[in-house]
């Protein structure tokens, strides 16, 4: 969908790297997005990935904020899709920072988690009350495409069907 992706890793030495299962085609998909995001990406037309190390809970570190505000790929983008862990710490603080920056923040319900369910629920309520839009991965995918005429419709439809079949706490809660 040609969307730039900015990821942060909280103290990688202790918590580990970004989980490759988050990407279509796993590690190969992540590696391709990283390659797309190398060097001068100001004229890139495909999706890109840039990963930043952090110790601050919000992902909006000085380095990320500078990248976000001064990168041509980010210019004119007023909406941010947000997902990750922990919902009640890093995701929530990032969401509140982005809202303060005047961004529309879309938090993907089935892509955020916390160790304790009640922490996740309270964080989602707080983010929504602060002005964030709570959505789902499938809803977001179809919203971004806008129409079955989108050139990636068939590929994304297959991904969403596959995603729905995966066992997880969110799908299982609604059976």
Image (spheres, rainbow, N blue to C red):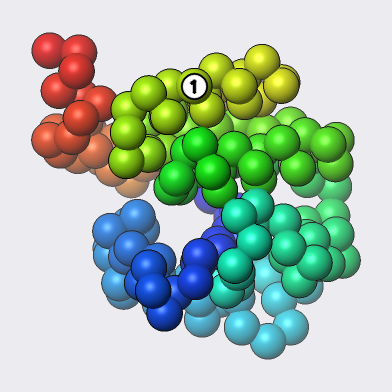
> Label 1: few (<14), some or many (≥20) within 10 Å?
some
Q: Is residue 62 above or below residue 137?
A: below
Q: Quadrant of residue 50?
A: bottom right
Query: Is residue 73 rendered to the left or right of residue 15?
Result: right
Residue sitting nearer the eye, 36 or 66: 66
Q: Quadrant of residue 69?
A: bottom right
Where is residue 72 shown, x and y percent of the image?
Answer: 82, 65
Labels in figure, total: 1
Residue designated by label 1: 122
Where is residue 135 shown, x and y percent of the image?
Answer: 49, 24
Q: Which residue lies at the image location 55% right of the left edge and 32% below the top edge?
A: 107
The local secondary structure at tag 1 comes to helix
Q: Which residue lies at the image location 12% right of the left edge and 35% below the top edge?
A: 167
Q: Is residue 23 above or below residue 40?
A: above
Residue sitting nearer the eye, 33 or 45: 33
Q: Is residue 22 visible?
A: yes
Image quarter where the C terminus lies is top left
Residue sitting nearer the eye, 29 or 114: 114
Q: Is residue 148 visible?
A: no
Farthest bottom residue?
A: 39
Q: Which residue lies at the image location 31% right of the left edge and 74% below the top edge?
A: 28
Q: Quadrant of residue 143?
A: top right
Where is residue 53 shown, x and y percent of the image?
Answer: 57, 74
Q: Is residue 121 above or below residue 32?
A: above
Query: Is residue 166 rendered to the left or right of residue 97?
Result: left
Where is residue 166 shown, x and y percent of the image?
Answer: 15, 38
Q: Which residue lies at the image location 54% right of the left edge and 43% below the top edge?
A: 89
Residue sitting nearer the eye, 83 or 154: 83
């Amino acid at each position: 969908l040609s969307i730039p992706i900015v990821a942060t890793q909280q103290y990688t030495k202790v918590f580990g790297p970004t989980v490759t299962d988050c990407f279509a085609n796993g590690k190969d998909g992540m590696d391709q997005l990283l390659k797309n995001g190398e060097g001068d990406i100001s004229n890139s037309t495909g999706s890109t990935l840039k990963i930043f190390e952090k110790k601050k809970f919000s992902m909006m570190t000085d380095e990320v904020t500078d990248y976000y505000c001064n990168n041509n790929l980010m210019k004119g983008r007023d909406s941010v899709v947000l997902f990750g862990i922990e919902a009640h710490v890093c995701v929530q603080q990032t969401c509140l920072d982005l809202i303060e920056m005047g961004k529309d923040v879309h938090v993907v319900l089935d892509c955020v988690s916390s160790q304790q369910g009640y922490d996740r629920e309270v964080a989602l309520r707080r983010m929504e009350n602060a002005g964030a839009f709570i959505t789902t991965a499938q809803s977001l995918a179809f919203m971004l495409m806008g129409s079955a005429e989108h050139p990636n419709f068939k590929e994304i439809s297959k991904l969403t069907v596959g995603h729905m079949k995966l066992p997880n706490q969110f799908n299982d809660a609604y059976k």
